[in-house]
Amino acid sequence: QVHLVESGGGLVQPGGSLRLSCAASGNIRSIYTVFWHRQAPGKEREMVAAIRDGAGTNYADSVKGRFTISRDSAQSTWLLQMNSLTPEDTGVYYCNAQSQGAVDDYWGQGTQVIVSS
């Protein structure tokens, strides 16, 4: 079992930056892929970034060059650095961890990001 807790959301002006954290506890060694998803008001949830086995990454086209997903040196927290934020980045951001082959699938409770002047 893995427990995920997101933090770092908040209100930021357009052009600003935020760093989201996803702290994992439990059977961390079982985690193979971590995703950050977001859900904007009135829209479906979308994947924005993924990191596999602590190395390979993927990004949604809308965030490429602005967002960076990483794993911290302690190996128990996954980060999403978000730069050059726009109002279109507003939404609830969720951390999602999967074991290899997606046999196990875990979600955090989400953290709200609001980009507004």
Image (spheres, rainbow, N blue to C red):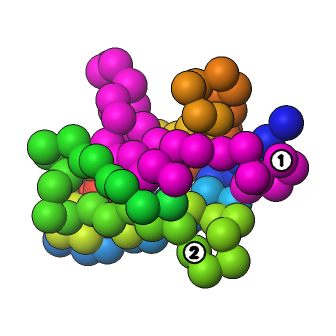
Q: Amino acid at mark 2?
A: Asp
Image disc number at residue 27: 1
Examine the structure image and report whether residue 8 is included in the region drawn in magenta: no
Compared with 45, 80 (above or below) is below
Examine the structure image and report whether residue 46 is included in the region drawn in magenta: yes
- Mark 1 vs 2, N-terminal side: 1
Residue at 47% from the left image edge and 43% from the top image edge: 35
Q: Residues within 10 Å of mark 1 (few under 14, many from 20)?
A: few
The quadrant the N terminus occupies is top right
Q: Residues within 10 Å of mark 2 (few under 14, many from 20)?
A: few
Q: Amino acid at mark 1?
A: Asn
Q: Is residue 18 left or right of residue 16?
A: right
Over which residues does the magenta segment extend?
A: 24-53
Residue placed most toward the observer, 42 or 34: 34
Q: Residue 67: x and y, percent?
A: 27, 62
Compared with 102, 56 (above or below) is below
**Residue 11 visible in the shown view:** no
Snapshot quadrant of residue 21: bottom right
Q: Residue 108: x and y, percent?
A: 66, 40
Q: Is residue 50 left or right of residue 104?
A: left
Residue at 66% from the left image edge and 69% from the top image edge: 75
Q: Residue 87: x and y, percent?
A: 21, 50
Label 1 to label 2, Cα distance in Å?
17 Å
Q: Mark 2 highlights which residue?
A: 72
Residue extending farthest to the bottom is: 73
Helix, strand, or loop for circle 2?
A: loop
